[in-house]
Image (spheres, grey):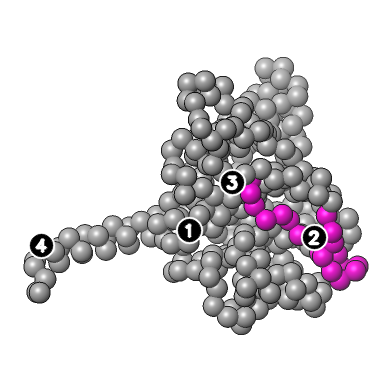
Amino acid sequence: MPTTTAETERWERLADELRNFHDVAQFLRPSPGDVPRIAGLDLACLTLPLHDVVGGDHVAWVDFERRYDLDLRIAEAEKQERTQVSRNLRRLRQRAGVLVADACGHRVTDALVAAMLHQAFLLGVNYELDLFGEVTTHLFDNLNTRFYKTTAVNKFFTMIYGEISEGGKLRFLSAGHPPPAVFSREFGRFMKISEDRLVALPPVGLQPSVADPDRRRHPTLHGYMRRYEVNEINLLATGDILLLHTDGLSEHADGTFFPARVEPLLADCRDASAAEICERLRQALLAQGAANDDITVVVLKKTA
């Protein structure tokens, strides 16, 4: 049956809408200029969408020193005699934050969930600095409840947010996300991390938070999620490497790529920069065969 002019126009409009959505979603991807500069640390990121150039994975860097006017915020806090807020803001000069999220699905349209998170997260960080002078678990309790109320259950996402300091300490919280992996330069292998340092709660959007002050107004049959907990691990020696990644890495090649192939790769390029390590990972991933999910890896390396 021949296509009518009206049908052709409708398909052209739909294609134009998808192109526009693609452009907006691509704009939200962090550029290399977003990677923070922290003394004694080298940071980089690798993202390989399954389809095209956007998907359900998302990374958001927070360079507190460059993104925010900490001097003005500190002066305002001291003027208001908010001593603890001032202290917290000063500590941010030696810290950088990174959010890694993995929305359920890997189509271009699934990037919408990641885009919603991107904007809500950065707006929340602004309020957190105003109220507390630092990012607290309160932000993520609110994000979880907000997404529970506004997205379908099958559009949940996993997430990990961490703050790395100059000394190599990573403080993080996890919502159903793969745990961090620490590679020791000295021993040439991944180190076992105690389970009590890897506390993770369910993915974002599955249950409202017990911290929601309005929970009596919105009863739920799914129960309530307890408050997020902060974990802490350390990069102890120069050359140690910490990876944050989505499950696309751990599931690649039917689970045979990570950690089995990544461990010798890191041992071979242990003296390379974080960006060079990301490139080596990219080459190895592509050589291993076709992926079945978006893949994201954040590399945090202690340099001195």
Residue to which mark 2 is pinned: 182
Cβ–Cβ under 8 Å for marks 1 and 3: no
Question: Which numbered disc, 4 or 2, marks the residue that appears first in the sequence?
Answer: 4
Residue 81 in picture, x, y percent from top left? 72, 17
Q: Is residue 165 above or below residue 84?
A: below
Residue to which mark 1 is pinned: 105
In the image, 227 versus 170, the foreground residue is 227
Q: Quadrant of residue 268?
A: bottom right
Question: Which numbered disc, 1 or 4, marks the residue that appears first in the sequence?
Answer: 4
Neighbour class for label 1 at 10 Å: few (<14), some, many (≥20)?
A: some
Residue 182 in the magenta stretch? The answer is yes
Q: Secondary structure at mark 2?
A: strand
Residue 66 in picture, x, y percent from top left? 63, 46
Residue 269 in picture, x, y percent from top left? 78, 75
Residue to which mark 3 is pinned: 203
Which residue occupies 62% across, 80% down? 288
Residue 60 in picture, x, y percent from top left? 58, 51
Question: Which numbered disc, 1 or 3, marks the residue that appears first in the sequence?
Answer: 1
Does residue 62 appear left or right of residue 216 in this picture? right
Question: Which numbered disc, 4 or 3, marks the residue that appears first in the sequence?
Answer: 4
